[in-house]
Amino acid sequence: MNIITRLEEAILIAIWRLKNDAYGVTINKQVSKSLKKKYSMGALYFALDQLLRKGYVSKSTKQFYHEKGGRSRTYYSLTKNGKRALQEVKAYQKSLWEGIPKIAFEVKKSR
Amino acid sequence: MKKKRPTPPSLAAWILSRITRGEDCLSILSDFSEIFEELVRERGTLKANKWYWTQVMRSIPMFVINHLYWSVEMIKNYLKIALRNIKRQKGYSFINIVGLAVGMACCLLILFYVLYEFSYDTFHKDADRIYRVAMEFRAKDQPVKYGAVTPPPVAPAILDNFAELEDAVRITRANGIVKHGEKQFFEDGILYADQSFFNVFTFPLIKGDPETVLKEPYTAVLTESIAEKYFGSEDPVGKTISINYQRDYKITGVVEDVPPNSHFTFDLLFSFAPIEESLQNASIGKLWFSHSYYTYIKTRSENLSPAFIEGVYNVSANIIGDFEKKVGFQQRFFLQPLKDIYLTSNLRNELGSTGNKTYLYCFIAIAVFILIIASINFVNLSTARSTGRAREVGIRKVAGAEKKQLINQFLGEALFTTFISTGITMLIILFSLPYFRALTGKDIELNFISTGIILCIILIPLAVGLLAGSYPAFILSAFHPVDTLKGVFGLTKKGVKLRKCLVIFQFAISILLIISTIIVSQQLSFMRNRDLGFDKEQIVVLSLRGSGEARQKYNVLKNEFMKHATIVSASASYTVPGRNPSSNAMLPEGFTGDQWQTFLINWADYDYLETYKIRLLAGRDFSRDFETDKEGAFILNEAAVKSLGWNSPEDAIGKTWNLGNRRKGNVIGVTKDYHFNSLHQKISPLVIHLDPNYFVYLSLRFTTGSVSETLSFIKETWKELVPDEPFSYFFLNEDFDRQYRAEEQVHVIVSLFTIMGMVIACLGLFGLTSFSVEQRKKEIGIRKVLGSANHKIVYLLVKDFLILVLIASVVALPVGWLSMNKWLQNYAYRTNMSIWIFLLSGFAALAIALLTVSFQTIKAALSNPVDSLRYE
């Protein structure tokens, strides 16, 4: 099984959540929000490229002419493999946590 | 009007556009500016700008990594494809790689040789500031003579008068018997030199201080190998050696052996003191006209002022101008840069053998030619095979490859192929270098520290890769994807034409090389076999040098040798053919007073003409029957008679002759002209006179029979009669032919590389034939089915190539004729270039091409049409 990084996991989930609106800006916002950390755009694009190479996401470039000020955007979407990878991660984490009660890691508020 | 949209900082945006990969660039820039605009709206331009900059800066590393990652990925793919192509078409790849490797190896070997020749005298530390003073000698009514030698007062005179001079050294050559204890040998590598020798030149001393070694009178410095020869493992410093059984010299130093790329060489170096002593009481005339000293100067700067050059030119006129006027001789001096001496100087009395720059340029031309032949193979085979790659190009283009990328890919492939070839080239060079060294007689070393050699090894493959790769790269990358994928793809007419032109060019060069090989070898054999006017075979020459005992006893020796059955004739002389005669002022009949004429002279004994089989045109040889022959007989050669304007050889007999007021007498004989020098030179006027005081050589003519037995007899007799004298001998024919060493070397190099060039060209032709046969496989099949005869098919295929070779001959023949005609002008006596040589070269090329082509074509013609026409 391929273990993907936390960032990649977050990106995949973000893309799934964003559905048809998953492009650089929105993905970055979503990921930064869920991981509570500001990622540089460069780091994000690199991770996206890696996911692309592994075949978890696919991309399509759309050129806007009048709407959105004539920008070009690269939209990302999950592939079958991408979805499977997310499921695998989830299952893996579940198996990792199996049998451990929540209480075991409760931090006492001593201070 | 719309409100102006906020724009991100342009520099940052530009950086961003540079570091992102092509296809994503636009959307990444858009993403960035989207957030930027949002920030401008929310927090103002300043904050937004700051954000933009920090984002760009923070992103740089990741973008760069991403960039590299994808580049590596592409290169991996290119490499894989390149390797697959090499593997898939083993035959072509082999021809490509091996042809290129052999071509580059030939080229590099030649260049190493050339670099070596250019490296002469560069090892001196201040080589750029060292000059040799050479001399122009003008005598009344005679052409100016240029000599490497100068009179001894020149060096002190210019050293005193010019502050520009740092130092000067005088050198003179000598030979003699060197003796230490029991060991004595004849040495001819002796130099007498001023103490400044080691200051001017850089010859590293192993022992002794360069400043002082030659300071004391009667001191000597030995080279390492000479020191070992006389002293073995002992330390020679402080010991003494003697020369010609006279004074002892104290050894003060040992110098490393002279590098082979020095224009002069020496084994022993003696202090100048004895020469100085001998010159002390000489008159001004004698001092300034003893031309046997070499003067080298070291200047303070590399730039010479015109005043200095002028001053050196007139140094003699300024000091002994009046005297010069009186005697009617003028000497002027000019400077030769040290590094140019070996290749460009070819004066009288050079201190060592000199090279020839023209030959080097010819060699460079050959090297370039071979490289071109090999590169053409590469271009031709790559473009010919390009149809095979057309689909790949189509797919790549459809997948979004740019033309630039494709060019890079194919250029890279070409470089990759040359890189593999370079590896093989290095192997070839490593294995062949020892043979090449033996062949050229040059001590060429593969010195990887030398920048010249490193540059050659790096630059040549690079240049070949780029030059040979660029044309196929442009052709391949220009394919139309739609056409290639549809399968509508024909051979471009232009490509075929170019290929044909290149083949013509290749063969024209090959034929040119063949012509030059044949003509060089013809000239060489012409020189070796020409009737020289004497018989150089079966003569052994003994040296009478030494203490003088052998010279005094030459008659005894001669008579003793003559007792042996195989020795038929013997005679002593000052010089022998192939070695330089002396020259002297003489007064022939009809000239009076001070009308001295300079003639070359050889002092020879009775029987000299007979021993050398020199023919007489008129008169007689020296004879013991005439008492006057002992001191007053002169024999001229035909050229001398002509130069004096005398009507005929018979006319010359009996005329009076005065040899420098020392000897007076009559002309008794005139010889037919014979080549006492090499065939480079016209036969000059020569006088032969009998005077045993000058004898240096004893020539013995022997009949066929056991040479070794005769030689051992000669040696034993020598040991018996003059046991203390060193015994040294040479065979005249070998010695004489040594004058053609330069030609021999050229011949060896030219013929070797002609063969290599031809082989490479044929490799290419072979590749092209098999390609064209493959292309026309179906056509051949159909022709055969329709009843075409085998030989007609062979003719059909061969015709195309033979026409090219034919055109190549037509192009090459006139060029070859012109260039070889020019080369032959170097020789006073030359072979004639018959038209047959040219026709032969053309035919040879044609035959070789035919042989190369026929293998593939015959195979194709004999093949079963079913195989080629069947669809699988």
Image (cartoon, rainbow, N blue to C red):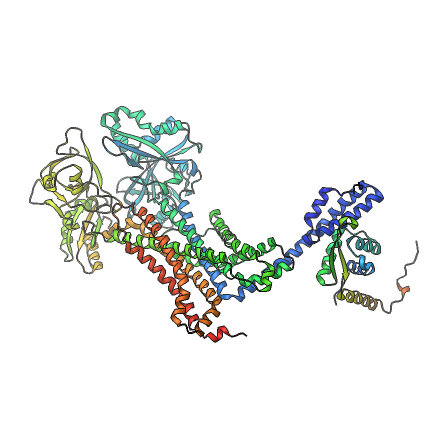
Q: Nearer the viewer, residue B411 or B648?
A: B411
Residue B222 x/y as whole percent: 36, 44
Q: Nearer the viewer, residue B477 or B296?
A: B477
Q: Nearer the viewer, residue B408 or B648?
A: B408
**Can the viewer see residue B753 in this picture?**
no
Q: Residue at x 25, y 34 (%)?
A: B143
The quadrant of the rendering that contains the N terminus of chain B is top right
The quarter of the displayed image where residue B475 is located: bottom right
Decide if residue B454 is on the left or right side of residue B231.
right
Decide if residue B76 is on the left or right side of residue B850.
right
Residue B462 x/y as whole percent: 51, 52
Q: Residue at x 64, y 55 (%)?
A: B71
Residue B425 x/y as whole percent: 47, 57
Q: Residue at x 28, y 36 (%)?
A: B292
Outermost residue toward the right in this view: A110
Residue A16 x/y as whole percent: 81, 61
Outermost residue toward the front in this view: B786
Decide if residue B841 is on the left or right side of residue B694.
right
B702 up-or-down from B237: above or below: below
B207 up-or-down from B144: above or below: below
The quadrant of the rendering that contains the C terminus of chain B is bottom right
